[in-house]
Amino acid sequence: MIGPLLPTYVFLRRAAKSGALALALDVAVFAYAGYLLLSRSPLLVALAAPYVIAPLLVSRGPLRVYSGLASALGLLGVLLMAQPQLYYQAIGFAIAVSSPGAVLVATPDKGSLEGLFRYFVVSTVASSLVVAGLSGGGPLGSVFVFSGIALELGAFPAFFWVPDVFSRASPEGLVLLSSLTKLGAALALSLLSFDVPPYVTVPLAAATMLVGNLGATTSREPGRLLGYASVYHAGLAIAAYALYKPLAPFLMFADAVGMMGLFSYLASPGPKWTAYALALNQVGVPPLVGFWPKLALFVLAARANLPLAIYVLGNVAWSIVYYVRLASSLEGGRRALAVAPSLFALALGLAAPLWLLPPFSLLLHH
């Protein structure tokens, strides 16, 4: 059903452009996707929440009317990745990581256009690697698939594009790219058919966390700082993949909530406290939702590899330095909608013992 739905939705949505019909089409696709995800796993519905919220946070720009389209296509790409057919998985990955990036030019200034070109080059290479890997299969195919996902996440050594794009593009255009493309790539870690051993992924995760934290600590421009912070979070997701695949999307989910909120804040500031709340969510301070996946990662690492657990904890503590500095440097504003991501992070964190209890109990027995 997803195959025919995709071109039909794109055609109708492109014809509607904006207005009530466009909104109705977006809502219908989100509702249908939610139904399919609910039938597969209720937790996947929670992981899809950023796809619904992010378009609402694009505050301005002539292309903001297409943010719902880009987000819905990204979610449909995730649904395709969840299919057993390898060709659907390959197409789904390409759609999931490229569609949200198209809104990078929400405000078509020179920096955003340069960022879009750079991102689409990276996205094309990443998708090509995934397609080649899924087609070939075997150990070499798994290496290709993982390389494509790691490139999309911004893992070491191919991480320079992330701070480059994040520092060039306008913040409203980065609301979707900084959150949904990363979440889509993290979902690919657990949905696509491949396997890479820990002796490859753990050193890569450690190097990625290190360069991300180093870059963020030495950066002063907010976009570049958040770009390097995204690299650090990619390292956490890869470490989670090495220990327990299903945890990787939850780590990037929590990061996506904070990233889309921070870039929305940079585009149109809200109350000052929201900047601190979002920064603390990225650090992993309870009761915000960013705390729980990091706790699970630490518990798993402590059981499997104590030095890795200490290393992860040290990097989490390191991130406090630049996230608090970032929140302190931002000016406050009056945009009411800017509080939504921080309230969402708080609500999910407070309710986490309910919706995360089943998977966390599985983690404890893993």
Image: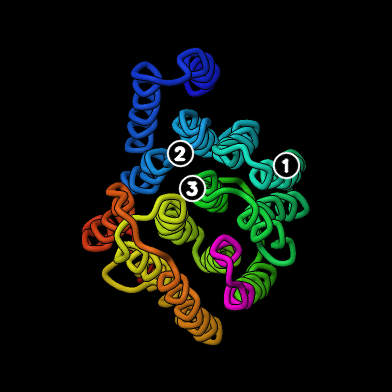
The residues tagged by marks 2 and 3 sit, at their Cα atoms, a distance apart of 11 Å
**Residue 68 location, quadrant:** top left
Which residue was labeled with disc 2?
60
Asked if marks 1 and 3 touch (Cβ < 8 Å), the reply is no
Q: Is residue 61 above or below residue 180?
A: above
The type of residue carrying mark 3 is Val
Q: Is residue 244 above or below residue 209?
A: above
Q: Position of residue 168 (x, y in %)?
A: 65, 53
Mark sitting earlier along the chain (2/1)? 2
Q: Answer yes or no: is residue 250 visible.
A: no
Q: Which residues are magenta?
A: 213-227
Which residue was labeled with disc 3?
175
Mark sitting earlier along the chain (1/3)? 1
Side of 309 where 275 appears, left or right: left
Tell me which residue sits at (51%, 36%) in the image.
Answer: 74
The residues tagged by marks 1 and 3 sit, at their Cα atoms, a distance apart of 17 Å
Q: Please, what secondary structure does the residue beneath circle 1 have?
A: helix
Which residue was labeled with disc 1?
117
